[in-house]
Image (cartoon, grey):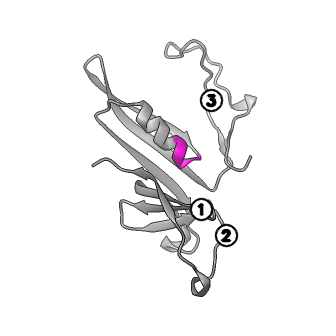
């Protein structure tokens, strides 16, 4: 459960609105149960009009699949939100992902961000002196 998005009935939007799609449920709030989460933002053309759509997920792999499912698109990007208590004045970083890699041995992820910063999330943190090289596999690369 630590990597899910939780909704509760008290946050369900039950108002009658014209924009609601049959078979869908709408929420005014959701709880993110993950320390790292992603926003996929995609611009697509619908009937000659550009429309921007956004999705939230707690998985870079799911974010990649959402993005691929929107093709063809005009543009698309994936943002990551990472809590960085030892960096950037103990702040939260919200930035576009350029590349994402998974460390095969530990299952952790390394994110290379558009602002030049890199972060490792998940897995056990090893001291720098004892760090051994790990094999990386590319999970996501931003289209330019």
- Residue 70 in the image: state x and y as whole percent: 40, 30
State whether residue 94 appears in this view.
no
Q: Residue at x 54, y 70 (%)?
A: 134
- Count neighbours of disc 2 (C-alpha within 10 A) and say few if under 14, some if 14 to 19, many if 20 or more: few
Check disc 3 and report the residue beneath it.
Answer: 27
Check disc 1 and report the residue beneath it.
Answer: 108
Q: Is residue 59 magenta?
A: yes
In-front residue for pair 87/121: 121
Residue 108: which quarter of the image?
A: bottom right
Q: Residue at x 48, y 58 (%)?
A: 137
Number of residue marks: 3
- Count neighbours of disc 3 (C-alpha within 10 A) and say few if under 14, some if 14 to 19, many if 20 or more: few
Left or right of 125: which side holds 116?
left
Secondary structure type for disc 2 = loop
In this rendering, the label closer to the viewer, 3 or 1: 1
- Residue 50 in the image: state x and y as whole percent: 29, 27
Q: Is residue 124 above or below residue 67?
A: below
Cα separation, mark 2 vs mark 3, equals: 35 Å
State whether residue 133 appears in this view.
yes
Point out the tag, 2 or 1, that comes first from the N-terminus.
Answer: 1
Chain part drawn in magenta: 58-62
Q: Is residue 119 magenta?
A: no
Cα separation, mark 3 vs mark 1, equals: 31 Å
In-front residue for pair 112/89: 112
Secondary structure type for disc 3 = loop
- Tag on residue 124? 2
- Residue 74 in the image: state x and y as whole percent: 28, 34
Q: Residue at x 38, y 36 (%)?
A: 42
């Amino acid at each position: 459960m630590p990597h899910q998005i939780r909704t509760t009935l008290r946050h369900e939007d039950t108002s009658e609105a014209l924009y609601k799609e049959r078979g869908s449920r709408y929420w005014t709030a959701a709880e993110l149960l993950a320390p790292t989460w992603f926003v996929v933002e995609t611009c697509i053309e619908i009937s000659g009009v550009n429309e921007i759509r956004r999705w939230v997920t707690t998985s870079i792999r799911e974010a990649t699949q959402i993005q691929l499912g929107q093709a063809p698109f005009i543009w698309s990007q994936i943002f990551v939100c990472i809590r960085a208590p030892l960096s950037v004045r103990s702040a939260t970083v919200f930035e576009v992902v350029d590349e994402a890699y998974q460390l095969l041995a530990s299952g952790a992820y390394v994110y290379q961000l558009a602002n030049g910063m890199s972060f490792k999330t998940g897995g056990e943190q090893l001291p720098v002196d004892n760090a051994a090289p790990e094999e990386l596999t590319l999970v996501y690369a931003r289209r330019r």
